[in-house]
Image (cartoon, helix red, strand yellow):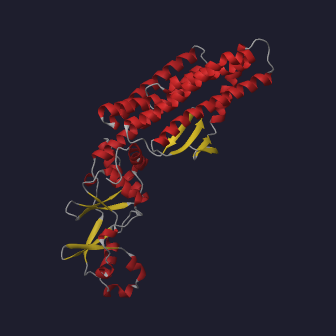
Amino acid sequence: MEGWELLRIRGIPLRVHPSWFVILILFAWTAQGQISTAIEGPLPFWFSWGLGLITSLLLFVSVLLHELGHSFVALHEGVKVRSITLFLLGGVARVERECSTAMGSLRVAIAGPLVSFFLAIVFFLSVKSANDFSPILANLFGQLGSLNLVLALFNLLPGLPLDGGVILKALVWQLTGSQRKGLQVATATGNGLSLLAIFIGTLLCFQGGGFGGLWLVILGWFGFATSRSQNQMLTLQKALTDLNVGSASGRRFRVMEEDNSLSKLSQLRLSSPDENSLPEWVLVCRLGRWVGYVNDEALKDLPVQYWEQHSLADYTKPLNDLPAVGDKDPLWRAVIALEKSVEGRLLVFNPAGLPSGTLDRVDVGAAVLKYLGLKVPKNFLEVARTQNNYPLGLALPEAVEAMLSAGLIDRSG
C-alpha cells in the first residue's frame, strides 16, 4: 500500500494514500453536521465546514499518533518500520518483520490503543476548561475525545487485522509456544467479527442507519478479505513446511560421458528438442562417476568443423556451480533458492551427495496444488513452465517471506 510521501519521522516515511482524501471529506461532513446540531444559534456554512475539516484533520493526527505508538515500540524491539500510510480505513504501519517473541509482539500491538486512550483522557479533561473559553472549542475537544476512545476500543476487538487480534495472537503464542496457533486463533476470531460487522451494518442500512451502517459493512468486508487472505497464506505456508523437495522434484537433465565429442552433444540437443524455455541440463560422468556439467556455450563459440575434435571434458564445469538443494530440505527452502537462481531452477542432491533430480517453479507449484487437493491440467503446467512461473499465480515467495518475517522459519537454519 503506497501513497505520496509527506515527511519522515525518525526515519519512518509518512505516506498518504489517495483514498484518504475520500474519508477526510466524509468525516468533515459528519463533524460539521454534529457541530451545527450541538452549537446553539446559526453558524455560517463556511465556519461549520471549516470546523468539520479541522476535526477530521485532528482525528487523523490522532490516527498518526496511534500508528507512531506502534512504530516507536517496534523500533525499541529492534524491528525496522518501513512506512506509515494513512488510507481510507485509517492508518497502517508496515514493518520489516514481526517481533521474535510473543511479549515483544504484544507490547508493539498494545502501544497504539494506549496512545489513543491517553489522547481521549487528555481531550475529555480539557473539555471543562475549554468550555469556559469557547463552547465551540469544548465541542471540538469532546468530539476528539470520543473519537479517540472509539478508536482505542475498536482496535482492541480480538480479531486480525486489528490490534486486539495481534494481542490475542501474542497471548495464545505465549501460552502454547506456537506462533502459528496464535495466528490461526486470531484469524478465526477476525473472520467471525467481520461477518458480524457485515450483518449489523446491513441491518442498519435497511433501518436508515446511513453512513454508519455502510461504514460497518465496508470495515467488515475489509476484515473478511484480510482474514481470507490470511487463511490462504497459512495453507500455503503449511504446504511449504510439510512437503520436502524430493516429493516435488522432476528429472529434467541428461547424462553423458566426458569422452563424448561436442558433436554428440549437438546431436542430443537436435534429437530431443526442448519445448520449454530452459533446455535440460547435461550432466557429465567419468566411468559412472559424476564430474560436472556442460552447457551449450562451446557449441555457440566453436565452429562446427571443430566439434568432433573436442570432447565434453574440455568444457566440463563443476556441479557446485549449479544452484542446488537437498531432496530432504523443506519446500520453502527451495523457493528461496529458486528466487535467487538466475535460471529459476535447481539441481537436487540426495543425502549421499549425488544428483537425483531437478526442481523448477512449476514443480514446486504442482506439488503444493496437489497437497491442497487441486488437480491442474497438464497444459496449464506446461504454459507456466515455458514462462518459468508458479502455476495459477501462486504467491509462494510471498508466503515464504511472511514466514521469515514472522520468525516461523530461519533462512540460515
Please provide percent x and percent y for residue 86.
Answer: 60, 37
| Image side of residue 174 versus residue 94, left or right | left
Q: Nearer the viewer, residue 192 or 130?
A: 130
Residue lying at the far top of the rendered structure: 40
Q: Is 300 situated above or below 236?
A: below
Q: Nearer the viewer, residue 260 or 186?
A: 186
Residue at screen point 49% across, 38% down: 73
Please provide percent x and percent y for residue 162.
Answer: 48, 30
Q: Is 104 situated above or below 159?
A: below
Q: Is residue 80 visible?
A: yes
**Number of numbered tags placed on the structure image:** 0
Identify the image quadrant of residue 300: bottom left
Q: Is 26 situated above or below 355?
A: above
| Image side of residue 38 versus residue 340, left or right | right
Identify the image quadrant of residue 363: bottom left
Q: Is residue 162 visible?
A: no
Please provide percent x and percent y for residue 278.
Answer: 39, 65
Please provide percent x and percent y for residue 141.
Answer: 66, 21
Residue at screen point 41% across, 50% down: 397
Identify the image quadrant of residue 235: top left
Q: Quadrant of the N terminus?
A: top right
